[in-house]
Amino acid sequence: MKHTLAHLKRGEKATITDVSSIHIPLKLLEMGCLPGNTVELVQLAPFQDPMYLNINGSHVAIRKETANHILIEKVDE
Amino acid sequence: MSKQINVALIGNPNTGKTSVFNALTGLNQKVGNYPGITVEKKEGICKLPRGVKAHIIDLPGTYSLNASSLDENVVIELLLNKNDKDFPDVAVVVSDVENLKRNLLLFTQIKDLEIPTILVINMADRMAYKGISLDIPYLEKELKTKIALVSTRKKQGIDELKQLITNYKDVSAEPCLNASEVDIDYFNRLRKAFPNQLLYKLWLVITQDVNFGKIDRNEVEALNDFKTKSKADLKRLQQKETIKRYQFINNVLKVGQTIDSSQAKDLRTKLDRILTHKVWGYLIFFFILLTIFQAIYDWSSVPMDFIDSAFASLSEWVKDKLPDGAFTNLLAEGIIPGLGGIVIFIPQIAFLFLFISVLEESGYMSRVVFLMDRVMRRFGLSGKSVVPLISGTACAIPAVMATRNIESWKERLITILVTPFTTCSARLPVYLIIISLVIPEGRFLGLGYQALTLMLLYLLGFGAAVGSAYILNKILKIRSKSFFVVEMPNYKLPLFKNVTLTVLEKTKSFVFGAGKIILAISIILWFLASYGPGDNFNKAEELVTKAYASQDISEDELQQHVASFKLEHSFIGITGRAIEPVIRPLGYDWKIGIAIVSSFAAREVFVGTLATIYSVGSDDEATIKNRMAAEVNPILGGPLFNFASGISLLLFYAFAMQCMSTLAIVKRETNSWKWPSLQLVFMSGLAYVVALIAYQFLK
């Protein structure tokens, strides 16, 4: 099964693998959300939405509906 | 005469770009609008060594040259238009030392436009704190630029930056990477078709719908051939381009930047753990809101009372000192109270913007957006709607303007449409006087009935805003991408200079923007109330004197009756009479009718108009109140302002769109009369129905 960013739990880290969906705004890519980069889930608002992420040092909040389209691979620690 | 150097300040949001602008220009700055749109244009003059001057324009913050909002469009439009009078001789890209990688993306794009570009690395004082060290000569070489290490907080590096701007001709205008490698074939064809144009410029024109007004039309049409690639293809290419740029940046920073993370101290994580916490986060936000309300309504009442009495005495003084006549009356009864009506809001607006700018500068506002997004979305709003809704408690005008950073048009539109429901400060005088008339003074659980009523009115306003947002969300058929990307910036101590300048500038723009409209309307109202058709108005003095001839009344009282009689037969009085049948079912008479009509300009005019109508002759609240309490309902007998009509009036003012200035600003922000008209009809219709039901049930 493919994991998306929406599956990440608080404090977990993952590597972004694919961002080619057209539902991902270019702005997010420009902020560093690109394949190969590490993403960490910093905080979740109630109802798990929006998600506060740390992508390679860039801190952004996005909605779950966007996170659903970002494919990741979890990093085992 | 030496030529002015045109400088454009460009940078991501939250990089301290505005601090750099403030440090360069100080008070030599002005804020205007770009022609035709409401995006703020900030420009200023900076004195450079050897008598040279630089004209500095502070462009809206943007993450890249691929624009996704009106503000960002401004940036590309200027940078692509060589004929614009503001076209920069040199671009200054401001970056934040902690987010250098992301900030450099925009830098490489600007370089591709072949404009000489200086790189400012701001917040350099944080380097040691974060364990960052930079190899400046290496970075300058690889990025083909000159770098200024600046700390606006410690006032370092500004002189070096000025020096670099003075010698801008030494700065390279070459691109630092070749982005067209992402699709060599495609870009070669493009180059062949337009040999005289900049490749990157063409690419920007192809990929976005910006208004490139002054770019040659034929060229743009010819470019359509290159749009043959499907939207998805173009987007994929943009993605590849972004990845390519990041590869370049990563390679440069791998050598040019070292971060010793063991040195880094992390305040951010600790603060975020509390401020975005599921429980504490909301509690803290609630507490901050309470403080803001306290400031707006309590602390600002002192200067407001002062302003109120100052303008009242100024009016009196003018009446006393100037010779009688139409001009003196216009000045004393139209213009001065009109100006007073504007100036009186300055304390509240200043307090509001003081808080908002501190919250934004510190980085806290993004956390609020994060906390509130899910809740607001349920009602078709966005987390970013919170700021306008809070601002709306002072005044809907700045609140509507604060919606600009909401990306989704639908969410933004709904926010604009519902914001005027929140209880703005102009409703307060109306509420206060009616509450004191019709709500008894008793207490319930230690809270006064009157205070409770006021609180209920606030909740009602907020409820109406959220409720109508819910309805609008269901009925508005606007398809708009609801993407939501919010940067969570680092926490920073707000800079005093930035906060002061924001408060000054926002207050100024309120006074001169909204002020003009309020002043114009007060003058018109004064004319309508001071002139009337026929004998009843023009021979009022005779008629009234005759009517009261048999009664023994003082000269003063007689004059008051004359004034009241005149008002009744003035243009505005006739209007009041005309609408009486419509408002009678709500429990109002023609006098209240006049007050409602005149307060369409601005709600607080209601109290002043009633003062004039009841010919009290002074704005003293207690006097107006006694006079209002004595007013008798002409049909039913008993006091006119009783519980039923009072509640009906309160509800009417809670919902009705009684504010011309807000309508004007909504027209400007939505660029159509459709939305303000809808707002007017919907809000005032709702107000009428609710007031009607309330009165009919309670009477």
Image (cartoon, coloured by chain):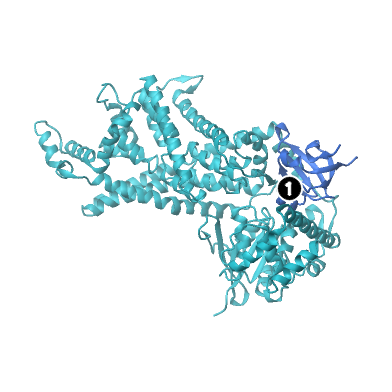
Chain colours: A blue, B cyan
Q: Whole-percent x and y of residue B617?
A: 26, 39
Q: Amino acid at mark 1?
A: Ile
Tell which subunit mark 1 falls on: A
Give residue B135's quadrant in the image: bottom right
Q: Whole-percent x and y of residue B628?
A: 30, 30
Is residue B282 shown left or right of residue B317? Answer: right
Q: Residue at x 14, y 33 (%)?
A: B553
Q: Quadrant of the N terminus of chain B?
A: bottom right
Toward the left, the furthest residue is: B550
Toward the bottom, the furthest residue is: B1
Q: Residue at x 67, y 41 (%)?
A: B367
Query: Is B480 drawn above or below residue B697 in the view shown?
Result: below
Query: Is B501 drawn above or below residue B447 in the view shown?
Result: below
Instruction: Name the foreground residue: B602 vs B433.
Output: B602
Q: Residues within 10 Å of mark 1 (few under 14, many from 20)?
A: few
Q: Quadrant of the C terminus of chain B?
A: top left
Give the total of numbered labels.
1
Is residue B143 shown left or right of residue B459? Answer: right
Camera sees residue B215: no
Give residue B254's quadrant in the image: bottom right
Instruction: Name the foreground residue: B142 vs B691.
Output: B691
Instruction: Name the foreground residue: B516 vs B38.
Output: B38
Q: Whole-percent x and y of residue B635?
A: 25, 23
Give residue B618's quadrant in the image: top left
Camera sees residue B377: yes
Q: Residue at x 44, y 50 (%)?
A: B514
What residue did someone put label 1 on?
A: A22
Q: Secondary structure at mark 1?
A: loop
Q: Whole-percent x and y of residue B45?
A: 56, 67
